[in-house]
Amino acid sequence: MLRKSLQIILSIVLAIGLVACGGRYSVPDNVLKNAIAISVNQTEQQISQELKLSADPKVSIDRVKITEQSPLKIQGSDGFHVKGVYDFTLKLPKRQESQSDNPFDLYLQRKPEGKTQTWQLAQRTEDDWNLQPIGARKG
């Protein structure tokens, strides 16, 4: 009886340890929101130029939900292919527009540098990656 109880307790401790240590790393929420904002801003700037708006709209990324995340290497460093949906608010000079459940499909590269991690938005080119800094995060 005691042996069976010990086996159960050890199994639970081992399972918790494996989940805690083996859990896959996730992209920090603020990094993901900033990466989405960069992508949305690039599109909005192009639209603003085409429509000849006097000021670029301000974009606020609200809810972000990751539906898929897979690790990969980007130029030799750890990266992630992240898909999901987000909500955003577009602030124009005289009005505000909101949209929900917009899909995103991003590649992010993580580079640990001492006690910080530098993140970059990675965009595929024909034969390489175009990297754009997102920001650093204390690790």
Image (cartoon, rainbow, N blue to C red):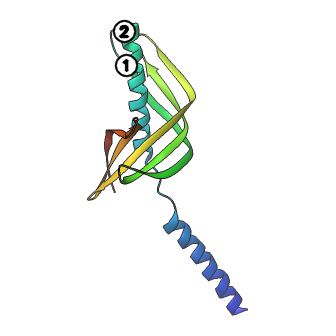
Q: Are marks 1 and 2 in contact (CB under 8 Å)?
A: no
Question: Seen from this angle, which residue lies furthest front?
Answer: 127
Label 2's element? loop
Relative to 55, does residue 79 appear above or below in the rendering?
A: below
The residue positioned 34% from the left and 57% from the top of the image is: 139
> Looking at the picture, which amino acid does disc 1 mark?
Gln
Residue under label 2: 53
Relative to 47, does residue 36 appear above or below in the rendering?
A: below
The residue positioned 44% from the left and 34% from the top of the image is: 36
> Looking at the picture, which amino acid does disc 2 mark?
Leu
* Frontmost residue, 118 versus 2: 118
Percent x, y of residue 16: 57, 71
The residue positioned 28% from the left and 58% from the top of the image is: 115
* Frontmost residue, 25 versus 105: 105
- Within 10 Å of disc 1 (Cα), the crowding (few <14, some 14-19, many 20+) is some
CA–CA distance in space, label 1 to label 2: 9 Å
Question: Seen from this angle, which residue lies furthest left?
Answer: 114
For the question of whether residue 102 can be seen, the reply is yes
Q: Earlier in the sequence, mark 1 or mark 2?
A: 1
Label 1's element? helix
Q: Which mark is residue 45?
A: 1
Percent x, y of residue 114: 26, 59
Residue 83 quadrant: top right
Question: Seen from this angle, which residue lies furthest bottom?
Answer: 2
